[in-house]
Image (tube, helix red, strand yellow):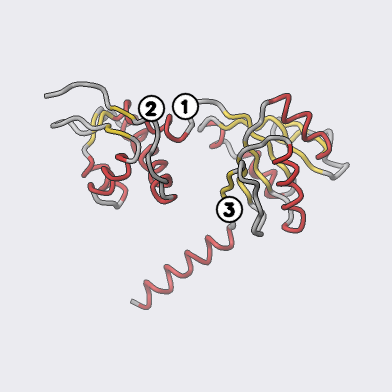
Amino acid sequence: MSDSKPRPSAGPSEPVPKAVVSRLSLYLRELEHLVREGHETISSSELGRRLGVTDAQVRKDLAFFGHFGYPGIGYRCEELILAIKRILGTDQQWAVALVGVGNLGRALLGYKGFAHRGFRFVAAFDVDAAKVGTEVEGVPVYHLDRLPEIVRAHRIRLALVAVPAAGAQLVVDRLAACGVEGILNFAPVTINLPPAMCQVGVDLAIELEQLSFAVVNRQAG
């Protein structure tokens, strides 16, 4: 029986579906839970059963990125955790900015789960004079005009955008001009992005619509 370490590939040879990346995060959380329970290994069938997917789906998802299992053993939990973190980029610390210190922005700054995953807020930005110069959850709030300076000083590559829809495009344009590479956009509006920038959109109303669809159609069935 081979006992060689799992072999991650240099990178996927084809575009990775968004659903696969979402499941990687679920695999990671379940593996961390397993380690806390004292498990050292897990099979693809058991990992899939815990998350409501097939063992074939688990193997297919991971195969985008390399070979991680051992014959007769399955996956070594600690090793697969490290591999998935490398794939997701969370094996490093990220300096993150927030633009928009309204009710949603303040809630995001207060969410401790970001830091646990390696995302550390180093700056927040707003145009409201009453907020500029204050701190929220220990994070300093700067005027938006200082964006280039602060992004450069902290080497910020990721930003959360929590501004009203009408101002979102302008904010994203300014972030892109500063060299920010990825945004998590909470503004309920479609944003035009430059080719070098990545976006994940979060529209909570859409999420509730998806949930209501699932509930209504389950009842109808």
Q: Is mark 1 on a helix, strand or loop?
A: loop
**Residue 107, placed above or below residue 140:** below
Residue at the extreme bottom of the image, as rendered: 220
Where residue 174 sits, quadrant-wise, is top right
Q: Where is residue 51 in the image (x, y as percent from the top left)?
A: 32, 48
Q: Is mark 3 on a helix, strand or loop?
A: loop
Instruction: Residue under label 1, please give it.
Output: 91
The quadrant in which the N terminus is found is: top left
N-terminal-most mark, 1 or 2: 2
In depth, the one of 141 and 191 nearer the eye is: 191
Q: Kindly check if marks 1 and 2 are in contact, taking CB atoms under 8 A apart as contact.
A: yes
**Residue 221, placed above or below residue 27:** below
- Residue at the image point whose x is 48% and y is 68% from the top: 212
Residue 202 is tagged as 3
**What type is the residue that disc 2 sits on?**
Leu
Residue at the extreme top of the image, as rendered: 4
Instruction: Residue under label 2, please give it.
Output: 82
**Residue 107, placed above or below residue 212:** above
Q: Horizontal placement of 124 versus 76: left or right?
A: right
In depth, the one of 152 and 98 nearer the eye is: 152
- Residue at the image point whose x is 52% and y is 67% from the top: 209
